[in-house]
Amino acid sequence: MIAVSTLAKTAVVAGAIALAVGLEPHGGAAPPVRSAERSGTLARIGLDATSDAQARQMRRVTEALGAELSAAARCATAECTVPALRHAVIGGRTNDMLVRVVMADVPTGRCRDYLFGLQAANEGASDEGHWLLPRLYERGTHRREITTQLALAGHMLLHAALAAPADVCSPAANGPAG
C-alpha cells in the first residue's frame, strides 16, 4: 500500500509540472465557443425556449447536488460523506462549465444574473470538495469540521438554485436586471 505522504508528494510534483508547462488550475479549459460561431448562423436575440429549458435543467441539477451535500452532512459517516464530496468536486465543476456555456447565449438581465449565481455556487462547491476530500484522511481533522463545511456548501447550492422563480429565463420574463 502506498503511504499518504508518498501520494501527497506525487500530487505536489504533478501540480508543479502542470504549472511549469502552462496548464491552469481546474484544467485550464478553453473558453466556450458561442453557438453562432459553431453553426455559422446568427446568434439568438433575447430569451427563448432553449434558454428557459437549459436554465431549468441547471436549476434542477444544482438543487439536487445541494440536497445531496446537505443529506451527507446530516449522515456524517464516510459512506455518505466521501461520495457526496466526490460528486461536489466532479458535479460542481461540470455544472460550472455548463452554466457558462448556457450564459454565453443569454442577454444581460435577470436570467443572466441568476445563471451567474448558479455558476458561482457550483464552482464554489467544487472548490470546497477539492479542499475537504483530502482532509478526511488527515490526522487531527474532526468529522464535525467537514460536515459543517459540507452543510454550508449544500446550503449555498440550494440558495443559488432557489434564488429566482423557475420561469426567470422564460421568454416572457425577459427584462433588465433589477
Image: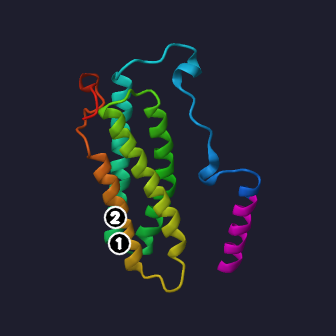
Please report the residue visible at 69 percent of the width from the left and 62 percent of the height from the top: 15
Colour theme: rainbow
Which of 99 and 45 lies nearest the eye of the viewer?
45
Residue on which the image places disc 2: 152
Q: Report which quarter residue 73 is drawn in.
A: bottom left
Q: Which mark is residue 126?
A: none
Q: Which mark is residue 148?
A: 1
Where residue 83 appears, x then y in whole percent?
47, 63
State the SS at label 1: helix
Where residue 129 appears, x then y in whole percent?
48, 63
Residue at the outermost bottom position: 140
Residues rendered magenta in the picture: 1-17
Please report the residue visible at 48 percent of the width from the left and 56 percent of the height from the top: 126
For the stretch drawn in magenta, what is the main secondary structure? Answer: helix
Please report the residue visible at 25 percent of the width from the left and 32 percent of the height from the top: 167
Which of 173 and 80 lies nearest the eye of the viewer?
173
Q: Quadrant of the C terminus?
A: top left
Tag 2: amino acid:
Leu
Vertical arrangement, residue 112 with respect to residue 121, above or below = above
Q: Report which quarter residue 70 is drawn in.
A: bottom left
Q: Is residue 7 left or right of residue 141?
A: right
State the SS at label 2: helix
Where residue 54 appears, x then y in whole percent?
39, 32
Residue 12 falls within the magenta-colored stretch = yes
Are circles 2 and 1 on residues that touch, CB within 8 Å?
Answer: yes
Q: Is residue 24 left or right of residue 136?
A: right
Where residue 41 appears, x then y in whole percent?
53, 13
